Amino acid sequence: MAEITMPMGRYLREHPTLKYFFFGGKGGVGKTVFAAAAAIGLARQGRRTLLVSTNPVHSLTSLFGQDMLGKHVAIEGVPNLWSYEIDTRQSIERSKQEIREKIRWFLKFADITTKADDFVESATMNPAFEESAMFENMIDLMFKNEYDVYVFDTAPTANARRLLGMSKVYALWVNKMLKSREEARTLRELLSFTKKKEADPLMTYLVSFRDRMEHARVLLTDPALTTFFFVTLPEALPIAVVTRFIQWFKDFGIPVGGVLVNMVIDPASVGPDTAEFVKTRVAMQQEHMKTIWREFDDSVRAIVPLFETEVRGVAMLQRLCDAIFAADGAKPTVESAGQPNQVRKRV
Ligand SMILES: Nc1ncnc2c1ncn2[C@@H]1O[C@H](COP(=O)(O)OP(=O)(O)OP(=O)(O)O)[C@@H](O)[C@H]1O
Ligand SMILES: [Mg+2]
């Protein structure tokens, strides 16, 4: 029988300092419901928890049946739990406004008379701008530190990894900018008749921006604070996505908490009268479970069954929460879900 070496419940007990929980994975695998269920579990431990959606396509509002776009809302029936969907449009407008001010400063500083708005449009039309606005919003929440724990429901992994990797790229970019800025300033001072030093607002901004990004990087790469869980299905594509992203996350130094397997059909429920379609699916899942044990092995934290309905509302999320936290070392939720490989490969 396959065993989960370190199930979710024990993992959390053994890592009590964790504060920032992220849930990632391929589209549609259950990131949102797992993030919400984990947030319920953490809130039930008495910790003030904020569940945040950084996915531009939000679904927490419909999951809980409470409107939370752009505001922190207390979840009915779950003490200590608040939930919040970052308002993408609001974030983008705020970032645009900030950039507009910076460009105005710069144009004035460089004695250029062109209007700032043309520059703002070209700087903010880039599709990566939305992601970076989301990232800024996310780290603002982390810095404010108003809750004991934060659970982030992220966009499908490509974006999530970019979001987290961005802090490193930003730092490189800002350092380059700072260097050329310093050179330009020295040149300007050399050329000016008065040797008076002028304040450079753009440089001040770049320094504070770099420091913010560095602070974010420090938090996001601290294994005592941050953990990233990947949700997968026993299917080829979600497994491939998780395998790839775990490697990328390692390269970025972002701590990986483990892998959660979702929508597993219990083979014991298959009988002689079961539809051929279901039998085939169960057999397929069992094959993929072998890959999961081989690839992720002791990083598997939970195996969650496919429920008879979709997951919506607090009661159903509580059931999911129980399934995620249920296994306490002995057995996975679905007992016969594949066998761990002899060759133990750690992620
Ligand atoms: N174990 C399960 N049993 C039954 N239904 C499930 C289970 N897990 C998730 N679902 C359902 O599957 C659908 C997808 O789940 P969810 O929205 O959490 O995925 P997601 O990874 O967040 O998707 P997206 O990438 O679009 O954000 C939802 O309708 C959810 O209720
Ligand atoms: Mg989602």
Image (tube, rainbow, N blue to C red):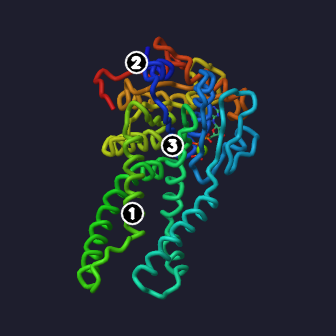
Secondary structure beneath dot 1 equals helix
Q: Is residue 139 left or right of residue 347?
A: right
In this view, the residue in front, 314 or 345, is 314
Residue located 52% across and 75% down the image: 120
| Contact? badges 1 and 2 (CB < 8 Å) | no
The residue carrying pointer 2 sits among few (fewer than 14), some (14 to 19) or many (20 or more) residues within 10 Å by Cα, namely some
Q: Which residue is mark 3?
A: 142
Relative to 238, residue 212 above or below: below
Which one is closest to the eye, mark 1 or mark 3? 1
Q: Is residue 196 left or right of residue 111?
A: left
Secondary structure beneath dot 2 equals loop
Relative to 317, residue 28 above or below: below
Q: Quadrant of residue 258?
A: top left
Counting labels gives 3
Q: Which residue is mark 2?
A: 5
Q: Quadrant of residue 79?
A: top right
Where residue 228 appears, x then y in whole percent?
45, 36
The residue carrying pointer 3 sits among few (fewer than 14), some (14 to 19) or many (20 or more) residues within 10 Å by Cα, namely some
| Contact? badges 2 and 3 (CB < 8 Å) | no
> Disc 1 marks which amino acid?
Leu
The residue carrying pointer 1 sits among few (fewer than 14), some (14 to 19) or many (20 or more) residues within 10 Å by Cα, namely some
C-alpha separation, residue under disc 2 versus residue under disc 3? 31 Å
Q: Which residue is mark 1?
A: 206
Please report whichever mark, 1 or 2, sits nearer to the chain's N-terminal start: 2
> Disc 3 marks which amino acid?
Met
